[in-house]
Image (cartoon, grey):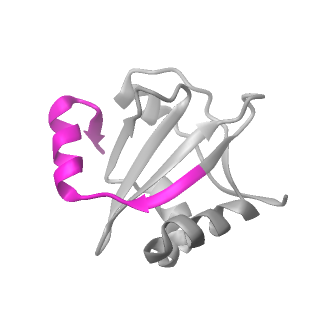
Amino acid sequence: MAKKVVGKYRPEFNSLLGISLPCVVITVSDGLIKHINSHHPDCTVYYEKIPEIIADPDFIGTDPTKKDSVELIKIYQDSILIAITLSSQGDEFYVATLFDVTSDKISRRVLSGRYKKM
């Protein structure tokens, strides 16, 4: 499966979240667009925005059930979340999914401390 570099994990993500993950590249594979098409078809238009979401997210957070994973959210007409996960080798992150999230969910997660405003 071909992979494409779409960004880099930045030190400020660790600072904001109080975690320590390696600052390595973030990639997408061919399988991601297939996943989005089949599971989140309304979000397909945002696939090309992944580098922008990584470069300039509006919110960042973690999923407490997923170790070595970070969520980046960008507000467009929809609020789009990408989940990036550290590879088992630890030498890159990969975009695991992309989908829309409600503003209410973002607000609740900011209040709980799970998400931080960038």
Res 38 quadrant in image: bottom right
Q: Nearer the viewer, residue 112 or 56?
A: 112
Q: Nearer the viewer, residue 44 or 17?
A: 44
- Which residues, given as a range, are shown in magenta? 96-118
Whether 69 is drawn above or below 5: the answer is above
Q: Nearer the viewer, residue 25 or 64?
A: 64
Where the C terminus falls, by quadrant?
top left
The percent coordinates of residue 109 (x first, y second) are: 23, 39
Q: Residue at point 72% right, 28% down?
A: 90
Is 67 placed left or right of 57 in the picture?
right
Q: Nearer the viewer, residue 110 or 96?
A: 96
Res 61 quadrant in image: top left
The percent coordinates of residue 98 (x first, y second) are: 50, 59
The percent coordinates of residue 45 (x first, y second) are: 49, 79
Residue at the extreme right: 1
Where the N terminus falls, by quadrant?
bottom right
Whether 44 is drawn above or below 117: the answer is below
Q: Residue at point 50% right, 47% down?
A: 83
Give the tally of numbered discs: 0
Whether 44 is drawn above or below 92: the answer is below
The percent coordinates of residue 27 (x first, y second) are: 69, 52
- Is residue 42 rendered magenta in the image? no
Whether 113 is drawn above or below 96: the answer is above
- Is residue 97 rendered magenta in the image? yes
